[in-house]
Image (cartoon, rainbow, N blue to C red):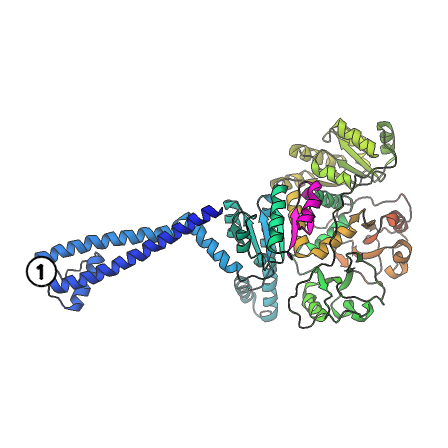
Amino acid sequence: MGLGATNDTMNSYTETRRQIRTALIVFLVVLVVGISGFMLIERMSLLDAVWLTIVTLATVGYGDIVPQTDLGRLFTIIMLLTGLGVFAFAVQAFLTLLFSPDLIRFRQQARTTRLVTKLRQHFIIVGQGDLVDHAVESLVKRAAIRRAVQARRTVQRIGWVLPPRAQRFIYKTALKFSRHTTVADLVVCVTQDPETASGIRALGILAIEGDPNDDEILARAGIGEAQALMVMEDSDTDTLLTVLTANVCNPNLMITAAVQDNRLSHKLMRAGANHLIDPAEVAAQFLNNVTFRPAVNEFFSSILFEQETEGWHVLQVFMYDDSPWIGRPVSDLDLNGRFDGAGLLAVRRADGSYAYYFTPDDVFEEDEVVLVIAQEDAIPAILRDSRPGQTYRAYGNTWQRLVSLEPQTRADSPMTADRAAQSIAQLRNHFIIGAGGQVAASALDRLAPERPFVVITSDPIEAAALLGRGFRVVEGNLTEESTLKRAGIERALAIMVATDDRAANVMAVLTSRTLNRQILISSVAEADDMVAKLQRAGADRVINPARIASQFLLLATTRPVISDFMNYVLYNRATGIETTELYIEASSPWAGGSIAELQVWHDYDARIIGVRRPDTAMTYSPAESYIIQPGDVVIAITTMQKSDPLRDFAYGEAQRRPQTLRTPLGAARPRQARL
């Protein structure tokens, strides 16, 4: 809603209120005139005159008191017609005030403005489209889950001795009257689309209609008191203008923005953006993880995005200058013993780098951020311990990570079609990528051609380009059995199906599952209605790129240190660090040994941050005394240079790999790729 439309609505609202006031004044005047008239004309007492005036204006007409003169009857007729006119005028004004779409929208905006003025350190979402829709949906879902968790805790505290029916009553009551504050309660959306605004309000999120490039609109959203802004515009030009406007309104605001063209990244950073996310690149990185490192994906998803259970979470602990943790050795804190198995995941240094391995004598310093994995019940105690009597205090970055446009990966020498076919024939337990879409192209930009990847594409130009970069390429139709067999589908560990053709994706998934029952299949779905179809066809994991991007935008804004840590360690060619998964079989030299005995940090610059057990349950930040068992999947952070040697050490043979990456038989199958 533009400024002109807002003014028109304001004028309409003012005019309607004026009409109501006029109707009330006229009614009072008619009432006084009627009482006076009946007293003078009919010589009635004050009480009789009041009674007759009221029943006349109300058109009740009891008949117990009636005018006795012709002049009195004429006066009554005039009173009756005047009263009906005033009543009709007042009803019209009231109905306009109650049911006029413009005035309803105005009252909503006024209510939103009142609520926004009470917010401090809140988040603002700007834009419209799929990214905003998915972000709001996620916030509302998480808020409902958090309130349900709090309601269950209320039952456990006060109703555990009561019968089931009483417990259910307490649960429903606690859920209805929950005052637990969630991120959704601290979000204000600004959008130019009235339908988007109405949909957001219907979900209980504050929404303001208007141009986010207008200082007045951003002021109504409370930008001066906000701690962060998320920009999810469809156009990079609009994003740039919004970032500039927001930075002028609040120079201390942390701004996260979705960018469609990475070539504008540096301009957006200069305009004031702190963090930029390319939805296609984020979806590609996530798709790479669910395809090639599914256990790593499950590990991070379970502690960052899933809140259905009262499980484990990653906590940002800021080392303010008054924190008692500063200067204390890691061993002295004893997080594991004092906080129900909590563990130290990483520390962000003041310069923006991360440390993920610690000795007992390491100490924390001011301006660092400690990432702790802990059970939800232990989080309040950890926060109190890290800063007793804490109140909110803004934390300013002492650094800003620069955007680096990484070049496409390229092997030392190009590949030819004949050499590719010969190499594919010798591959076992390799990975297949079905190209033909933007997400797949971004995924290939992050993959090293010398690793066991096979790309299928029907585009001769794309095939030639990929061969030139050193990839093994099979040119053909991804949906045909002959093409998949040429790519070695029967011997492959996983296949990524990520074309822009919805029907082709379903057919390719179905054909792949027919040819290899053990292969892990991942795919993309641009719409949520395609998820069930792809899963029914045989896909193990399905991602919606817009949904994934919105999740990472929320993470980067609400928990920026954790988001940056993920980017730092998942698979980062700039830092040379990756997170890998190691499948432990009975023949592995690791089986039966403790983590301390492996000495992986000293020999491989690695740290084990998690273990997925055979029953798919996760052990987070395992202690050094943890005994690794056959069937475990070890999740470790290491350098890219030592990733393959570490894998060889775990498997015992350089060429030995797991037989399947699929979730073990009997474990619950995910409905959709975890977020």
Position of residue 231 measured from the top left corner of the image (x, y, whole percent):
62, 48
Q: Residue furthest left?
A: 69
Please tell me whether mark 1 sits on a helix, a strand or a loop.
loop
Residue type at mark 1: give it.
Gln
Task: Look at 36% across and 55% down and name the residue there.
Answer: 17
Horizontal placement of 70 versus 517: left or right?
left
Position of residue 325 measured from the top left corner of the image (x, y, whole percent):
76, 69
Position of residue 665 measured from the top left corner of the image (x, y, whole percent):
75, 48
- Quick one: 311 or 410, which is closer to the camera? 410
Position of residue 670 measured from the top left corner of the image (x, y, whole percent):
68, 48
583 w.r.t. 165: above or below: above
82 w.r.t. 475: above or below: below
Image quadrant of residue 283? Answer: top right
How many other residues sit within 10 Å of disc 1, few (<14), some (14-19) or many (≥20)?
few
Picture mark count: 1
Horizontal placement of 380 versus 445: left or right?
left
254 drawn magenta: yes
Task: Look at 53% across and 50% down and name the residue there.
Answer: 200
- Quick one: 655 or 358, which is closer to the camera? 358
Residues shaded magenta: 252-280
Task: Look at 77% across and 50% down and name the residue there.
Answer: 570
314 drawn magenta: no
Residue 517 in view in this figure? no
Residue 314 in view in this figure? yes
- Quick one: 635 or 230, which is closer to the camera? 230
Q: Residue furthest front?
A: 248
Horizontal placement of 489 versus 264: left or right?
right
Task: Look at 24% across and 52% down and name the residue there.
Answer: 85
The residue to which callout 1 is attached is 68
167 w.r.t. 548: above or below: below
